[in-house]
Amino acid sequence: MSHDTILIERTYPISTPALWQAMTDKQKLKEWFFEIPDFSTNVGDEFEFSKSDKSPNHLHHCEVLEVIPNQLFKFSWRHPKQTKGISVISWQFIPRMGATTLRLVHEGLEHFKDAGEEYSQAKFESGWERILGEGLNKFVNKL
């Protein structure tokens, strides 16, 4: 694993199909992540979102690269207003007895070095830890 790669694993007390739905259904996604009106799980489709309406300059642009239902959702992740760099995110779903482990791999963060400290590996890592540890965890525990 590259030095500029984030790997986070979290186990959630729900079935793999239920976690897949929480992470790939745009209505559910907006409850714990962001509202992404054009979100898609079709390979080749692209979608965009911003942190909020108040920060349109913090645009995320993604393209779906690979999908294996209930196993893998892989997409590119860019910040076109800050950098030409592209990273890749994989959400891997691993069934466990009565639970599912989510393995998040975020690769290619070295391509964002020209965008400044806000796009550093440390910032991404703390963001993913918060999103998965708080947002997704709270959502899953309500199911």
Image (cartoon, grey):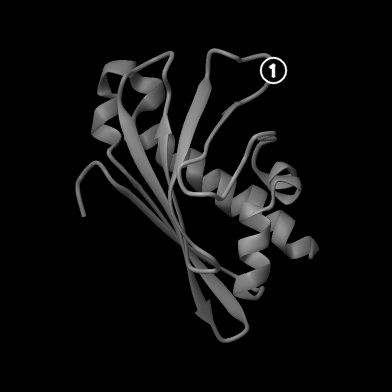
Residue under label 1: 53
Q: Nearer the viewer, residue 95 or 121?
A: 95
Image position, residue 71 (x, y; %): 48, 68
Q: Residue at x 27, y 17 (%)?
A: 114
Q: On the picture, is 5 further left or further right than 103? A: left
- Outermost residue, right side: 142
Q: Is residue 26 left or right of residue 66?
A: right
Q: Quadrant of the N terminus?
A: bottom left
Q: Give coordinates of residue 72: x percent, y percent.
A: 46, 62
Identify which amino acid the numbered label 1 is placed on: Asp
| Residue 97 left/right relative to 22 | left
- Please tell me whether mark 1 sits on a helix, a strand or a loop: loop
- Residue extending farthest to the left is 2
Q: Is residue 124 above or below residue 140?
A: above
Decide: is 49 above or below 97.
Answer: above
- The image quadrant of residue 130 is top right
Residue 32 or residue 46, whichever sits in front: 46
| Residue 77: quarter of image | top left
